[in-house]
């Protein structure tokens, strides 16, 4: 008896229903990304200079790792996020520094909510002095924790919806 082998068509992602899964996952990642973007924008809501928050989504056919990047290229927002060390400040464009003595912070560590605040009190001046720096507000860490909790659950549900379509 002789065995007969017939050539078969290669199995494609579409045949396995993977395109539907990928499509559902991309849609869910867009929703998650937009929610996270709005959440981070909320941390800057009361700022006079609001940083532009951007989003990138990663999910390719060749690399199954899914990712959402929410970021801002704004220098001041990154200083507030990461904090600054104590340092010396001196006037650059004027003979002396001047500022209002009291400042109420508009953000808190571990919170993605913006509060009212700002400058108040008497005016002070200096030819240069040491400042204590900014305590890191950890916006990126807080947002990552928020996304990590819900991302796996929602992407798994999207994958199941996509597989059910096929």
Image (cartoon, rainbow, N blue to C red):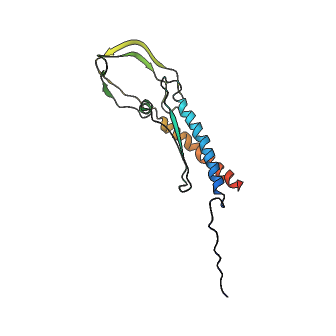
Q: Position of residue 9 (x, y in %)?
A: 64, 68
At x 65%, y 76%, the residue is 6
Residue nearest the viewer, comparing 68 with 12: 12
At x 47%, y 25%, the residue is 49
At x 48%, y 31%, the residue is 109
Quarter of the image where the C terminus is located = bottom right
Find residue 133 and report its image quarter. Answer: top left
**Residue lying at the far top of the rendered structure:** 122
- Along the horizontal axis of the image, is 148 left or right of 138? right
Please say if 16 is above or below 106. Answer: below
Quarter of the image where the N terminus is located = bottom right
- Residue 64 at least partly seen: yes
Q: Position of residue 12 (x, y in %)?
A: 62, 62
**Residue lying at the far bottom of the rendered structure:** 1
Residue nearest the viewer, comparing 141 with 70: 70
Residue nearest the viewer, comparing 46 with 153: 46
Q: Position of residue 159 (x, y in %)?
A: 64, 52
Q: Position of residue 147 (x, y in %)?
A: 56, 41
- Residue 156 at least partly seen: no
């Amino acid at each position: 008896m002789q065995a007969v082998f017939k050539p078969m068509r290669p199995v494609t992602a579409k045949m396995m229903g993977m395109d539907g899964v990928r499509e559902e996952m991309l849609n869910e990642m867009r929703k998650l990304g937009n929610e996270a973007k709005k959440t981070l924008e909320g941390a800057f809501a009361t700022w006079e200079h609001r940083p532009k928050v951007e989003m990138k989504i990663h999910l390719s056919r060749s690399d199954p790792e899914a990712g959402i990047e929410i970021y801002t290229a704004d220098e001041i927002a990154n200083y507030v996020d990461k904090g600054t060390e104590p340092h010396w400040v001196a006037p650059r464009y004027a003979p002396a520094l001047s500022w209002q003595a009291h400042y109420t912070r508009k953000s808190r560590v571990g919170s993605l909510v913006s509060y009212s605040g700002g400058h108040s009190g008497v005016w002070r001046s200096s030819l240069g002095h040491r400042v204590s720096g900014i305590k890191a507000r950890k916006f990126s860490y807080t947002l990552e924790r928020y996304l990590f909790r819900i991302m796996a659950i929602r992407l798994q549900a999207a994958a199941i919806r996509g597989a059910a379509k096929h």
